[in-house]
Amino acid sequence: MKTANHTEVRGFVFQGFSNFREHQLILFAVFLTLYLLTLAGNVIIVTIIRVDHHLHTPMYFFLSVLSTSETCYSLVIIPRMLSGLVGLSQPISLAGCATQMFFFITLAINNCFLLTAMGYDRYVAICNPLRYTVIMNKRVCVQLVGGACGIGLIVATTQVTSVFRLPFCATKVAHFFCDIRPVMKLSCVDTSVNETLTVIISVLVILVPMGLVFISYVLIVSTVLKIPSARGRKKAFATCASHLTVVVVHYGCASVAYLKPKSENTRDQDQLISVTYTVITPLLNPVVYTLRNKEVKDALLRAAGRKLS
């Protein structure tokens, strides 16, 4: 029976934003603009960090990796979503859907743990400044990035394998990409075990790194409050402001999307949440780090000055 169902369903069709049919061209224009801004912003951040030696520090190494990861994350989802909005969407094969889900999960979890590594970096910089260069050496930074990527690959392999072992009876995905729950809903059999696995993994990959970042900031705040001068306290908090802004939005969206009960929201609400973490969050990174971060703004001005001269 299972084999028959698998051969019967050879691919899926995304329903996308079919509930907003009259607004699809407007959505296309808005999402295309945000997508191009995301790509441009992240490319600028990676480039400026590479060419400006003032930014050759662990914090900006992590930021460049995060920007690269966010760019790839956008490329996995948004082009197909945009083509669907203008009626050019093609059915996606089971292998294509599994591939999209694999890269989406890998990159999303990689981003979660990169933000944790950046939180640890800020903790060491503020709470242990004299040993910062010793603790956050190049080897440690590469290991942290490798660990984040490794966790993403392991979790993605586990999730994708469990989902695509299911027999499928329906072909219409009530979403604009191959997310875990919308694809599982197409199965012919009870998916309670898969749902439980998804919840357990979501708790581990969202709440654990979020908890580690929270602990880092508790220790940071307690250290900063001991700084005697108001100027020193302000400077210390300023170095964390950009990271903390990205963390709150990133983990907030992920928590709402994957830690809520599966039947709590309507399809439109689920899509709105998905748009936030697939379109808005990747753009947040370059916007926050260029508008709120003095070192990045100074580096951009130096690069512009060199070009003009």
Image (tube, rainbow, N blue to C red):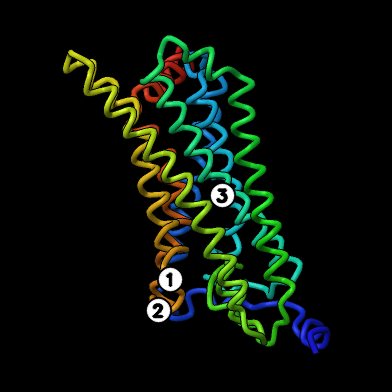
Q: Residue at x 48, y 19 (%)?
A: 55
Task: Give residue 88's quadrant in the image.
Answer: bottom right
Q: CA distance from mark 1 to mark 2?
A: 6 Å
Q: Earlier in the sequence, mark 3 or mark 1?
A: 3
Q: Residues within 10 Å of mark 1 (few under 14, many from 20)?
A: some
Give the mark nearer the N terminus: 2 vs 3.
Answer: 3
- 122 vs 17, nearest the viewer: 122
Q: Which residue is mark 1?
A: 270
Q: Which residue is mark 2?
A: 266
Rendered position, 267 above or below 228: below
Residue 244 shows in this picture: yes
Q: Nearer the viewer, mark 2 or mark 3?
A: 3
Quarter-wise, where is residue 19 in the image?
Answer: bottom left
- Residue type at tag 2: Thr
Residue at 61% x, 47% y: name it.
72
Residue 264's quadrant in the figure? bottom left
Query: Tags 1 and 2 in contact by the CB under 8 Å rule?
Result: yes
